[in-house]
Image: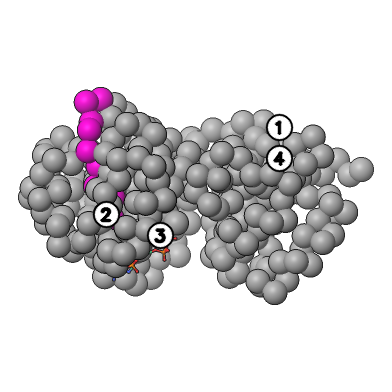
Amino acid sequence: MSALSRAFVMGHPIAHSRSPLLHGYWLKKMGIEGTYERLDIAPDRLNAFFSDYRETGWVGGNVTVPHKSAVIPYLDRIDSNARALGAVNTIWWDDGQLIGGNTDGIGFMDNLDELAPGWDSGARNSVIIGAGGAARAAVHGVLGRGLSVSLCNRTQSKAQALAEYFDGDVRAHSLDELPGLLEDADLLVNTTSLGMVGQPPLDIDLAPLKPTATVYDIVYVPLETPLIIEAKAKGHPVVGGLGMLLHQGVPGFSHWFGQTPTVSVELRNLLTDDIVAKSPSA
Ligand code: ATR
């Protein structure tokens, strides 16, 4: 067997994934003989990809859109995080079994804990905007810390479906209800694509928020969204989305290469430079 451990990120499209930059950095930094390769797998090639998976020698990899749920039938087992989120973003081997996990919730929480330490002391209520896959990871993480979740989405029926999926203190609301909900919030999270480059900003009035409330935007291109800029100007603790990408990669790397990497300032700077260099206004 080759000494080279090969991991991948697969999705469709995949060209813009920053995961190769992240894992490539850790491989080099830690002196590990390994690769992390970008694989563009169209949905009609998923079956073929897994039919010879065992022979190809992959140590594992990341799974992204549109395959996060579609890969599940090909795996021997999924972990409790993947079960809770109904989606897999990381695959690895364990004792000859192909395992699927989901590290998005871990990345979401570790980033929050790193950038707003102590955010949850005395915190009781959260407002989470959006009802897609990222919202699911956020709701899972925040419920795990014992906060209530008010889930607000443009399409309220989707928020309702997501609220029902979780067996905790989650209530669905429309975006019109935000002002009243913000008054009691200790944490506000944007999980929608609003504020991302090329998208309109998330247009909400932060005036009702308590000054101590933490504002978290999972969007990281641009690094500081209009929401983060406004929240910062008002003195709120703020958390940008880049660290979620960095932290979600840690468990996968450990599974594949046997060593636990760290999210360092140098790594943040590397990704920040890449985002700035590729942003339209640069
Ligand atoms: P992901 O899986 O990455 O979270 P997604 O499933 O496409 O992405 O979800 C995107 C979220 O952004 C949804 O909650 C979506 O609201 P709808 O459910 O009503 O579609 C929200 N979103 C996207 N564009 C929006 C807009 N212009 N205004 C309000 N919400 C928007």
Asked whether disc 4 touches disc 1, contact meaning CB atoms under 8 Å apart, the reply is yes
Q: Nearer the viewer, mark 1 or mark 2?
A: 2
Q: Which residues are magenta?
A: 121-130
Q: Which mark is residue 30?
A: none
- Whether residue 92 sits left or right of residue 197 in the image: it is right
Give whichever of discs 4 and 3 has the lower sequence position: 3
Any atom of ligand 1 within 8 Å of the CB at mark 2? no
State whether residue 38 is above or below residue 78.
below
Q: Which mark is residue 132?
A: 3
* Residue receiving disc 1: 258
Q: Name which residue type carries label 4.
A: Trp
Residue 5, position in %: x, y?
78, 44
Say which quadrant the C terminus sits in.
bottom left
Q: Name which residue type carries label 1.
A: Gly
* Residue receiving disc 2: 172
- Whether residue 54 sits left or right of residue 63 in the image: it is right
Q: CA distance from mark 4 to mark 1?
A: 6 Å
Q: CA distance from mark 4 to mark 2?
A: 38 Å
Q: Which mark is residue 256?
A: 4
